[in-house]
Every structure is written in structure tokens, then in C-alpha cells.
Amino acid sequence: MRCLVRRRPVRCRPVPRTLRARLIAGMLTLLVLTCAGVGLTTTDTLRHFLSVRLDQQLSDTGGRYAASLERRGGATPDGTTVTSDPMDDSDDSDDSGDSSDTRAQAPGTFGARLKNGVVINAGVVDGDADDAAVEAGDMAADTDDLVKLTARDRQALAALAVGGPPADVALSTLHHYRLHAITGQDGDVLVVGLPLRPVEDTVHRLITVELLVFGVALAVTGVAGALWIRWSLRPLGRVVATAERVSALPLSNGAVALSVRAPDDDPRTEVGRVGNALNRMLGHLEDALAERQAVEERLRAFTADASHELRTPLASVRGHTELALRHRGPVPPAVRHSLTRIDAESRRMGLLVEDLLLLARLDAGRPLALGEVDLTRIALDCTADARAAGPEHRWCLVLPERPVLVSGDGDRLRQVVGNLLTNARTHTPQGTEVTLRLAAARGVRLTVTDTGPGIGLQPPERAFERFVRGDEARSRSSGTTGLGLAIVHTVVEAHGGTLTVASRPGRTEFTVLLPPGRGLSDPV
């Protein structure tokens, strides 16, 4: 059996993304590191200073108190209290007799006497009444407080280096001590020590003060730094606001007025250099847009003028062709075939000229005709026409129960639906299913879906460009000009709607979204 262990998802810590947040976070991080460094340095310096003073006190005290314990009751190795042997001729006691010498000894001073690595006596100056009597000269008044040491304490005392530097030792009953071991006059070892609690208390008070001071400093510096950074980044914010306003301008519809400029362009600052570069870029962009607009206007004017000029000769060609075809006399078959082709191509060219004229008028901003249009009727008529033109396709029509009415130009909307159905019929093989669906909900939605091979363009929205075909390799024998979907796109936008396409092999869908109503006037 396999045991599946689910790993807990790793949660990523939030990382500040904005420049302001990163600067504030970096400033606070550096300040925390600085405060930590200062705190550690001052704490270590103070601890070292107090330790040196404690060592100096131990040196000044010497082993007098430990030597005075020679004739006092002591602690045997098993922890029991004993009294030194009075017959021991090797003692080096002073004039204090049987009393320990606590004169000039600070309360808490520790003393111990070791013989052959064994603790013989150990005591602590407790600063009580008997010690005060000794200080006054009554040496017999001292009853001395001897201490019992554990086996671990005796091992720690025996391990002290005789004559070496003082060491910190944790005694079980006496907390932490700074101990110093020296050699006595009779070859024994005298250990004297001072408590480390005052040092630790002083260091702890310093740490508490530093935490309070550094905490207040961090809070005040964080607020002040955040305000300062926010004020310092205001010029950059103005540059960003300028770039956002420029990005929101409708630059694709011919507007070339780029009067927006960054207010901060002082070359002495980094933000000023960015603003200056942005202003230069906007100037170049304005020039390029003006040049593009001029080229497009010239091209549109040429298209409109050429279309108008071509109308007359095309009408003459068609008229003479029809007149020649109506000739009653015998016409050779080859000539009649040529005249028929001339008539068909002239009609096709006439449709192309009309499409170009329509696009030129829409590009010029000519408004569409205003009227109530029944899209349901248009869908029925266009589907019937498509079924008659392409009986080999399967045509489906899905309509709502009630008629769908919109405000717009009926002829242009009919052209939109007809071009979409013609596009589906022309660019899909026989047997393809084409569905026209009409719905009204928060506007009007018209979709044309086919089950053909799809659009061979990436992205498929390129099909809305002029003179672009869905299959670049398709020959022109199909009769398409590449303007059908461009006209649909332009007419839909003129009605305030949108045209989208989604295509993949086996399904292509064009979607037209129209508003429920719009104030239009003056027919094209």
C-alpha cells in the first residue's frame, strides 16, 4: 500500500511591489539593522566594562575572605557541614581567630578553600548584623553563613585554573558568579568570587531602555520617512499620471492632438530626466501621428475621388456592352463570350467602387440614417437569400418570440447581415451548417456561426482589415474583394456596436453587439 502524503502549500510572503513601498521597507530594514548593531555593540561594551570592573574588584579583594574560612565549619565532599581540624599545623589563619574576615568585603562575596582538589570550606558574605559587628571590630560576633555545594558545584570549583583569568560559573544555590582561583600560603587553593547579578541587571536595564528608545525611533522615523518619500515621489507620480492620460487617448481614430506633457522636466533630477524624455517621446509621437493622419486623409480622398471618377466610365462600359449584346445581327460566339465577360467584370467592378465609396463616407464621419429597423425581418430575408444562393449549405435561423427592433440605418444593417452570411457561404465547403442567431438582452446580439475549417489568420481579427482574405493562398476566382468584413466592422462601429470573431477548425463565430437605440440622422 502506498501512503500518499499531501504537502502543505507554501505560502509566499507578500513582497512590496510599488517603489514607495520598497523604499519605505528598505529604509525601515536598514534602520532596524542599524539599531540592532548599535544595541548589540553597546550591550557587549557595557558587559565587558562591568566584567573588567568586577575582575578589578576581585583582584583588590584578594583571597583574604577565602583564607579566613580555614578554621570555620566547612562542607565536606558529600555536602555535609564540617569544622576544620584544630590540630592542623598547616593553617595560615590570620588574627581573626575562628571568625571569617568580612572586612572590606562586599555583600555577596563568595569564598572557598580547596585542599588537594576537594572543597574544604565555602561561604558567602551576606551583609547581615554579624558582618556589621565584625566591621565594628567585634571579630567574635561573626557566625558566618556557610553554603552547601552540590557535587556539580564542587567539580566546577575544582576545574578552575589556578592563577588564570576569572571565569563565569553557575552555582546551583548562588546563581551566576565571577570566580577567581589563587594559591594559598600553605599550598591550598583559595577561590574568591563576586555575583554577576548586578552586571546582568544593569545589562537587562540597558536592553529594555534600548528597546523602548529604538521602538519609538523606528515608529517616528517610519512615519516621517513615509511622508518624506511620498513627498519626494510626487514628481514621479505626476509623470505617471501624464503617461496614463496619454495611454487613455483615442490615438487609433485619427486624433493627433497630444497637448499633454509631463510637468517635471528638470534635467538636474532623475525624475526630471524621465519627464524630459517622455515629453520628447510625446513630441515625436505627435509628429508621427500627424504624418500618419495626413497620409490616411490623402489616401481616403484619393479613394473617394477615384471611386467617383470610375463610376462614369464603368457606366459607359456597361452601357456599350449591353448595347452590343442586344445587336440583332449575327455576333460571333467568341465576341459574344467576350462581351458577356466584360459585362460581368464591369458589374463586379461597380460593386467594388460602391463598397469603396461607402467606406470613404464612413471614414469621413458621415452619419447614418435614423430609423426603427426590424432586425428580425432582415434576418429572415437575408437567410432566404443565402439559402437561394447556396442550397448546398445547411441554413439554420434562431429568432426570439418577439421582433427585435433597433435604431439605425436599415440598408446598412441589411448589408451587415448579408455580408456575414455571404462570407460564411463563400469560405466554407458544401454541406457546412451555418446558423444565424438573434437575441435581445441588454442590447441586441446577432451571431453567425459555421462549422467550416476556420479562418486562416492569426489573430482572426485581421479579417476585419481591408483587402484581407481569410485564406491568403485563395485565388481571386471566388469573386471576393476582401472588403465584406471590413464594411461590416465599419458599419457596426458607426452604429455604436462591436464586432468580434472566434475561430478554430470546425467552428467560426462572428458576434455583433448593438445598443438598443441611438440618435442617428442624415443618411449617407
Image (spheres, rainbow, N blue to C red):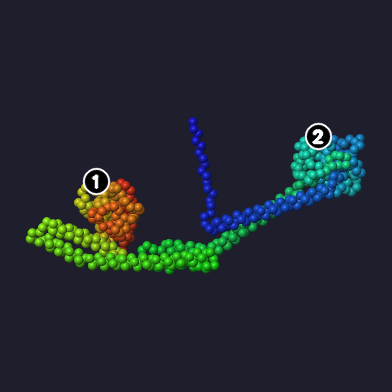
From the viewer's side, name the closer residue of 411 and 394. Answer: 394
Instruction: Report which quarter residue 98 is drawn in.
Output: top right
Q: Label 2 is placed on what type of residue?
A: Pro
Q: Label 1 is placed on what type of residue?
A: Gly
Q: Residue 218 location, x and y as percent?
A: 62, 56
Q: Secondary structure at mark 1?
A: loop
- Left or right: residue 76 versus residue 481 is right
Contact, mark 1 vs mark 2 (Cβ under 8 Å): no
Q: Which residue is mark 1?
A: 431
Numbered mark located on residue 292 in the image? none
- Left or right: residue 303 versus residue 53 is left
Q: In the picture, which quadrant includes the C terminus?
A: bottom left
| Res 221 seen here | yes
Residue at x-position 48% and y-position 65%: 277
Q: Earlier in the sequence, mark 1 or mark 2?
A: 2
Q: Which residue is mark 2?
A: 77
| Res 124 seen here | no
Q: Nearer the viewer, mark 1 or mark 2?
A: 1
Q: Residue 504 location, x and y as percent?
A: 33, 48
From the viewer's side, name the closer residue of 231 and 274. Answer: 274
Residue situated furthest left in the rendering: 329
Q: Residue 105 location, x and y as percent?
A: 84, 47
